[in-house]
Structure formats: structure tokens, C-alpha cells
């Protein structure tokens, strides 16, 4: 038997080297019968990886961590975090391994990371494994987010392992190969802070500055600047989620990155009928992570990051707290700015339109949308047609026609730019019923529906004939009580 050569991948172990206290050298579990389910060829090319080599047995060994590249040091990354508000000092490792960091052909550093690669000493009671369905969900949703222009971890591949995974039923297992700017989380800082080792906390902050927010290094107070940079990227990120109707579902502090990328797609979903109180997660009984709560939760999580950083902000605790509170105050300002400018763009408002005209247009359309529970995605797209003179599709979705007509008249008068609207209002998002359909088929071995869904959502602004069903709302029966389950 000839063994295909390993794809030539050179991985650094910078995280493990600089932060050994947070890294535990470990190996992925064997995969009895690896089978490639989906490979992201454009992403492979961006990373400088040869897609054909990744399809070979050696390539699958890389994508499952069972044959790491020579010289690589795969590690589990420990973190703490608040889950639904309750603190866990050693939450886990994401049931994942960091294979290492690679430098892309354009000189950027990316984590190559495996989710579902088996038990580690940090796994608590869990098996460290993942099932095919949830890994395909993360693949399709993260790639849709990327195509929407929203910062996110990426998905390189899903490989079925041939190992059964015991959940409520026995499911086929899989490993997701994930790519990120890093896997530093708010929970990583909480863990470092809780050790009481300020030197470790400082090294972690320096690592984060170097990788994500290098401008902070030159600021008069670098760690405060780091915190403000994270506040900034998170305010912008959550505003972008809100503008496409995305509900993350489990915004625990371990699921919030320092880089500002969306991470860990578990019980996430896109709004169909617009209702700010929408919750999709089966375990979120209080609605903590409901659509409309996401900005508030992000701010709460950032307060936990600030607490972790206090020893670096000032020697005097009281002064450190005062600085943190002041910096956290920028979240609301930044979020409100990002949300309002994004909504202006979705409505095609001309640049520089006076707030006195724009603000009532934004407020009233939000109210009309929730009052009529319009389909979030198709309503904005229909407004693009309204801007071109055909108001009927949008008008047909609202209940209060008089209010809509009055609003539309004032809106048309400011000259909305329909082409600009079509560039920010997607036609195709991974709608819940389509995702469920694709995962169900994928779990049973038929990847056709997943491939067709990926084709639609990875070019989301580009309306194409033949893809009508990917733009249409779910059948009414589907949405009644739709819940997604934690990606365990
Ligand atoms: P999640 O809500 O998916 O972010 O899960 C929270 C954390 O619990 C993960 O980051 C893991 O560290 C841990 N965890 C979840 N599921 C498993 C599992 N099957 N095996 C081991 N650890 C797990
Ligand atoms: Mg997580």
C-alpha cells in the first residue's frame, strides 16, 4: 500500500509556547473509518492548503488530528466561563484540539482547530465527541455568516469518523476542522485571572494584543486599550448579527471571542417571523439569549472580561474598576452607532441624511415589522423592490397598511438606493427548516441537500432563478415551537 504524502502544512505552536499554563498537549482520538463529508476548497486555497492532498488518507489524518503534521504540538485549551449566568471555573476545552497556527500565503496567522476530536483531561464528564448533524450545522451557518460579511470562525471540513456517538440516540460521529484568527475567549481571560497569576494574565493579554489588536500596544494604557478594542469589535459584531436576524443561542462567556469573530454555532438560528423575543435554544427557558437581549448580554459578558482584566488596568482596585466602567460605557455608544448605520444601509438611506428624518424612519419600520411579524429576510429584500417602485411584495407582508403607506411615502421621498439595498439585504440565509432538512439528510448519508443549501447561502445577495425555495419562509407548521438543541 502506498501512503499518500502528508499535505505540507507547517504549524507553529505559539499559543502553547507563550501560554503553557493554558495548553495541554494531547492527541486526537482514533477514527475507525474516516470519510470526508464536506471540504471547503476556497478556504483551503486561502490557507495555502492543497485541496486534493486534503482528500487523501493522509489529508483526512490531518483534518481529524490523527496524523498531525510533523513538528506540530496539538493542545487542548483550557478556559473558564459563565454559562447562563453561572460561573464555572473550569468549563472545559470546547471538546477540541488546537492543532497549531498556520501562516496563510498572504501572511496572516490562523488557528487550525478540531472540534469533536475526543476526550481530554479537561472534558469533565463529556466524551469530547461530536455528531455529524451539529458539525454540519456549524459548517453551513459559519460559512453563511462569512458570506454575509460577518466576522466568524470558518469551517474547513467535516469528516465523519465512523465512531458512533451516544446522545439521546446513537448518532454517527464527526470532526469539524475549524479555522479562526484565534480561539481566545472571554473565558480564557476569566480562567487566567482566577489562577491569581498576574504574570500569566499579562502574557495572555500581550498575546491577544499581538494577534488581534496590535494598535493597543502603542497606546498609553495598552491593557485598557485592549479592552476597549474588544468592546469595539463585539459591539460591531452583535450589531451585524441583529441586522441579519441572527440568534446565537448560547452567548456564554466562553462563546465570545477576543478577536470579534462569531464562534460556536450550537442552538443558533435566523429569525423567520420577526419577533424580538425569539429564542431558539431548547435549554434557554428564561429567554436570556433571545434575539433582542443579545446586545445586553454582550455588554454583560464584556463586564466579565473587564473584571478579569482589573489587575492589569491599575494597581489600585478602586481606580481599576472606575477605568473599566468608563471603558465599558463605550459599548452602548458603539453598538447604537453600528446598528443605526446598518439599518440606514438596509433601508438604502442616502449618506448624510439628517437624523431628524432618518431616526423616525428607522423606529417606525422596526415597529411595523414586529407588529406584523414579517419574515425578517424577505421583508428587507422586498423593500428593495419597493424602492424601485413595486411596493406590493413588502406591503403584502404588513397588517397595518395605512401605517406602511404613510411610512413608505416619506421613505421614498428621501430617494432610497435600491441597488445598495440589494448589496446588504440577503436573499438567502440558512433558514431553520432548510438547515434541518440538510442535516437530517446528511446524517443519513445524503449530502445533496447540504450542498444545494451551501450553494445558495454562500452567495447570499445574488438572486438566482431556480433557488426560490431557499428564499421562501418556512411552512407555518415548521415554525410553531421550533427549537434547536445544544451542539453536543
Ligand atoms: P458549548 O455550550 O457547546 O459551548 O459547551 C460548553 C463546553 O462544555 C464546551 O466548550 C466543552 O468544553 C464542554 N463540552 C460540551 N460538550 C462536550 C462533550 N461532548 N465532551 C466534552 N466536553 C464537552
Ligand atoms: Mg463553546
Image (tube, rainbow, N blue to C red):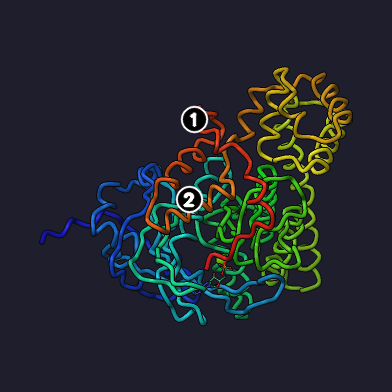
User: Mark 2 highlights which residue?
Assistant: 438
Q: Nearer the viewer, residue 185 or 417?
A: 417
The disc at residue 466 is 1
Q: Nearer the viewer, residue 444 or 94?
A: 444
Q: Can residue 313 be seen in this view?
A: no
Residue lying furthest front: 477
Q: Answer with left or right where residue 459 lies relative to residue 31.
A: right
Q: Tell me the quadrant of the picture where the N terminus can be found.
A: bottom left
- The image position of residue 245, as x and y in percent, is 68, 46
Q: Which of 257 and 212 is in front in this view?
A: 257
- Contact flag, marks 2 and 1 (Cβ < 8 Å): no
- Residue at image location 43% in from the left, 61% down from the top: 132
- Residue at image location 74% in from the left, 59% down from the top: 299
Cα–Cα span, label 2 and label 1: 18 Å
- The image position of residue 438, as x and y in percent, is 48, 50
Q: Answer with left or right where residue 34 lies relative to residue 234.
A: left
Amino acid at each position: 500500500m502506498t501512503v499518500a504524502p502528508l499535505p505540507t502544512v507547517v504549524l507553529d505552536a505559539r499559543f502553547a509556547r507563550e501560554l503553557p499554563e493554558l495548553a495541554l498537549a494531547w492527541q486526537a482520538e482514533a477514527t475507525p473509518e474516516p470519510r470526508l463529508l464536506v471540504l471547503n476548497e476556497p478556504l483551503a486555497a486561502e490557507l495555502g492548503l492543497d485541496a486534493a492532498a486534503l482528500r487523501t488518507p493522509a489529508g483526512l489524518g490531518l483534518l481529524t488530528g490523527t496524523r498531525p503534521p510533523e513538528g506540530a504540538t496539538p493542545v487542548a485549551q483550557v478556559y473558564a466561563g459563565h454559562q447562563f449566568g453561572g460561573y464555572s471555573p473550569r468549563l472545559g476545552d470546547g471538546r477540541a484540539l488546537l492543532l497549531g497556527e498556520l501562516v496563510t500565503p498572504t501572511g496572516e496567522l490562523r488557528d487550525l482547530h478540531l472540534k469533536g476530536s475526543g476526550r481530554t483531561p479537561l472534558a469533565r464528564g463529556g466524551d469530547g465527541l461530536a455528531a455529524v448533524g451539529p458539525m454540519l450545522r456549524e459548517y453551513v451557518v459559519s460559512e453563511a455568516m462569512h458570506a454575509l460579511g460577518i466576522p466568524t470562525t470558518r469551517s474547513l471540513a467535516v469528516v465523519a469518523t465512523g465512531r458512533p456517538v451516544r446522545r439521546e440516540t446513537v448518532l454517527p460521529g464527526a470532526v469539524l476542522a475549524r479555522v479562526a484568527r484565534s480561539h481566545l475567549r472571554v473565558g480564557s481571560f476569566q480562567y487566567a485571572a482566577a489562577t491569581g497569576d498576574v504574570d500569566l494574565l499579562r502574557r495572555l493579554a500581550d498575546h491577544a494584543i499581538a494577534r488581534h489588536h496590535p494598535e493597543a500596544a502603542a497606546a498609553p494604557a495598552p491593557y485598557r486599550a485592549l479592552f476597549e478594542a474588544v468592546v469595539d469589535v463585539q459591539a460591531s459584531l452583535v450589531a451585524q448579527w441583529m441586522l441579519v436576524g441572527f440568534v446565537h443561542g448560547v452567548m456564554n462567556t466562553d462563546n465570545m471571542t477576543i478577536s470579534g469573530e462569531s464562534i460556536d454555532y450550537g442552538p443558533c438560528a435566523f429569525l423567520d417571523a420577526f419577533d424580538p423575543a425569539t429564542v431558539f435554544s431548547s435549554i434557554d427557558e428564561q429567554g436570556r439569549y433571545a434575539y433582542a437581549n443579545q446586545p445586553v448580554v454582550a455588554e454583560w459578558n464584556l463586564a466579565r472580561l473587564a473584571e478579569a482584566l482589573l489587575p492589569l488596568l491599575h494597581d489600585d482596585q478602586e481606580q481599576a474598576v472606575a477605568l473599566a466602567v468608563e471603558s465599558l460605557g463605550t459599548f452602548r455608544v458603539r453598538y447604537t452607532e453600528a446598528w443605526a448605520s446598518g439599518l440606514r444601509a438596509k433601508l438604502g438611506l442616502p449618506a448624510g441624511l439628517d437624523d431628524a428624518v432618518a431616526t423616525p424612519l428607522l423606529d417606525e419600520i422596526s415597529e411595523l415589522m414586529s407588529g406584523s411579524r414579517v419574515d425578517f429576510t424577505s421583508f428587507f429584500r422586498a423593500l428593495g423592490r419597493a424602492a424601485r417602485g413595486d411596493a406590493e411584495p413588502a406591503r403584502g407582508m404588513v397588517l397595518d397598511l395605512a401605517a406602511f403607506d404613510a411610512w413608505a411615502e416619506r421613505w421614498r421621498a428621501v430617494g432610497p438606493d435600491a441597488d445598495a439595498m440589494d448589496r446588504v439585504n440577503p436573499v438567502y440565509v440558512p433558514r431553520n427548516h432548510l438547515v434541518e432538512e440538510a442535516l437530517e439528510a446528511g446524517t443519513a448519508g445524503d449530502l445533496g441537500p447540504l450542498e444545494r443549501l451551501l450553494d445558495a447561502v454562500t452567495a447570499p445577495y445574488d438572486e438566482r432563478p431556480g433557488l426560490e425555495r431557499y428564499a421562501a419562509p418556512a411552512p407555518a407548521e415548521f415554525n410553531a415551537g421550533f427549537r434547536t438543541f445544544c451542539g453536543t
